Image (spheres, rainbow, N blue to C red):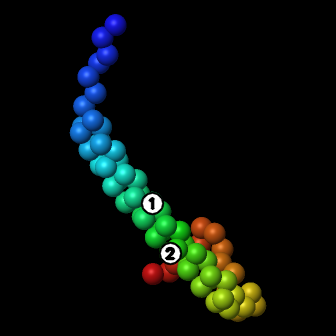
Amino acid sequence: MVRAKVDTQRDERAKRESQIVIDAERAAREAKTARLRELRLAAQSAPEPDPARLKPTRRGAHSKG
């Protein structure tokens, strides 16, 4: 039985290229996670609006303008 010839350079190049893509995706995911964490922490530390100061609105009410 004859073995198929393996192109090791092509295989190594494909591994390098895929690793570049994987690293870029990981960096983007980590940046997004950090940004969302900062937003969540900022929202938690911000004072919540006073419910007594909020004006109730009617749904479907049209303005007179």
Which quarter of the image is occupied by the C terminus? Answer: bottom left
Question: Is residue 38 in view from this perspective?
Answer: yes
Q: Toward which corner of the image does residue 39 lie, by quadrant?
A: bottom right
Query: Which residue does the numbered mark 2 point to in the structure image?
Result: 35
Q: Toward which corner of the image does residue 52 lie, by quadrant?
A: bottom right
Write the residue at 52% across / 74% down: 34
The disc at residue 26 is 1
Where is residue 55 drawn, in percent x and y?
67, 86
Position of residue 12 relative to residue 35, above or below, is above
- Report, in whole angstroms, how far the alpha carbon at label 1 lies from the one at label 2: 14 Å
Question: Is residue 62 in view from this perspective?
Answer: no
Q: Which amino acid does label 2 sit on?
A: Arg
Most foreground residue, 15 or 38:
15
Count of numbered tags:
2
The furthest residue to the right:
52
Is disc 1 placed on a helix, strand or loop? helix
Few, some or many C-alpha atoms within 10 Å of disc 2 (few <14, some 14-19, many ≥20)? few
Q: What residue type is labelled 1?
A: Arg
In the displayed structure, does residue 60 sit left or right of residue 24?
Answer: right
Which quarter of the image is occupied by the N terminus? Answer: top left
